[in-house]
Amino acid sequence: MSRRFILRGSAAVSAAALLLAGCVSPVAGPSGQYAAPIGNAPVTANPTPYSAALYCLADYARRYNLPSPRMAVGRISDYTGTVSSDGGRQITGGASLMATSALAKAGAQIVERYDTSVSELELRYANNKLIGDRAPDAQGPEDTQYRRILAGQVPGSDFYVVGGITEVNYNIRSGGIDIAGGEVDSNRPGSGILNHRVYVMNIAMDLRLVQTTTLEVVDVVSYQKQIIGREISAGVFDFLNGNVFDISAGSGGMEPTQLAVRALVERATVEFMANLYGAPGPEVCLNAANDPLGDSTVGPTGGYYPAYPTQDTNNGQTRADPSRWHDGRDGDVRRSRH
């Protein structure tokens, strides 16, 4: 290989590097940004294979006028103590928040017990007559009345969910294969390699449902979920006149660990709420009357109390539409003046 060819190749690589570096400027552009962020994926729902069962139970309870007990969520902690390579937590600390979302999908009546800091602060302010509420017929700030504290104004819970993540087992089983080939004759260079790896881990969770007034544990579930990861790579390298060429490519993927935690929480919540609703089993979802795709206020994203009667156009299903409200996907928003 000639020296001129090597110099041309080096110049081409240098030019490409400078071109890529030129995409970032030290001077802010007209938009006020140094660089435009890449990616335009819309916000989507985050369901698990058990989400449909949750809002099927919600619709079942609504169809048959089954009242939901008041539910609260306590602390669902990570008791495994696992730490990732960068020093952070390996397992999410948001399992309690996932449980709240799961209860909402099931149509449960929820009272807040996980973070009561704002309510407690305002109760202290109200006790000192520092919080004001405007009356419906108020004409101005002078008509504002201090918030009154009434006996029994905070509804109590009937049951609460508590527990934790109790197991994280790495490399339950792994396997792979390496294939390499090449020429032993230096006059006929060229070789390649192929790698394939598969590994399995699991996460386990123990949750319990406690009756608030008696502290009696009325339901206990313990589940585990296995997670699989894989990696495939291939490469070719060659020696030409003393120059080394190495080309490799690969792909890898691992089932999301935190999504596995959400799946565990939702499976447990399905069992809790099926018991509290008296649902005989999954066959309730086969009833044509139980249609979770109607104008229900629960859906893949959770549940809510409607402030206005707009469930025909705003409901649990429309909230899961990835194009809704997106200025590049929703024609109504795109045609607006803003």
Image: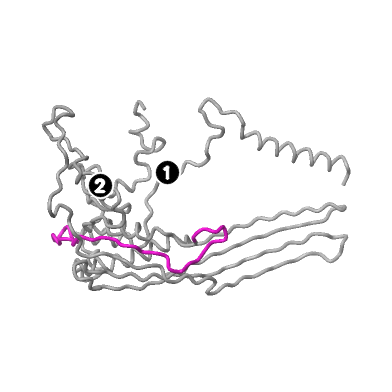
- Determine which residue is flagged by label 1: 42
Residue at the (30%, 51%) spot, across then down? 117
- Residue 249 location, quadrant: bottom right
Quadrant where the image shows the C terminus? top left
Position of 122 compared to 2: left or right?
A: left
Q: Amino acid at mark 1?
A: Pro
The residue lying toward the viewer, choosing from 57 and 234, is 57
Position of 194 compared to 79: left or right?
A: right
The residue lying toward the viewer, choosing from 25 and 245, is 25
The residue lying toward the viewer, choosing from 65 and 5, is 65
Position of 248 compared to 97: left or right?
A: right
Residue at the (19%, 46%) spot, across then down? 127
For label 1, the SS is loop
Question: Residue 38 in the image: x percent, y percent?
Answer: 53, 40
Mark 1 is surrounded, within 10 Å at the Cα level, by few (under 14), some (14 to 19) or many (20 or more) other residues, namely some
Find the residue positioned furthest to the left: 137
What distance separates the C-alpha of mark 1 from that of mark 2?
A: 19 Å
Q: Amino acid at mark 2?
A: Asn
N-terminal label among 1 and 2? 1
Question: Residue 180 in the image: x percent, y percent?
Answer: 72, 66
Question: Residue 131 in the image: x percent, y percent?
Answer: 21, 40
Does residue 325 lie above or below 169 as drawn? above
Q: Are marks 1 and 2 in contact (CB under 8 Å)?
A: no
Instruction: Tell me, yes or no, whether the highlighted magenta stretch contains residue 277.
Output: no
What residue range appears in magenta?
60-89
Position of 316 compared to 80: left or right?
A: left
- Determine which residue is flagged by label 2: 315
Find the residue positioned furthest to the front: 128
Instruction: Tell me, yes or no, whether the highlighted magenta stretch contains residue 69.
Output: yes
Mark 2 is surrounded, within 10 Å at the Cα level, by few (under 14), some (14 to 19) or many (20 or more) other residues, namely many
The residue lying toward the viewer, choosing from 288 and 306, is 306
For label 2, the SS is loop
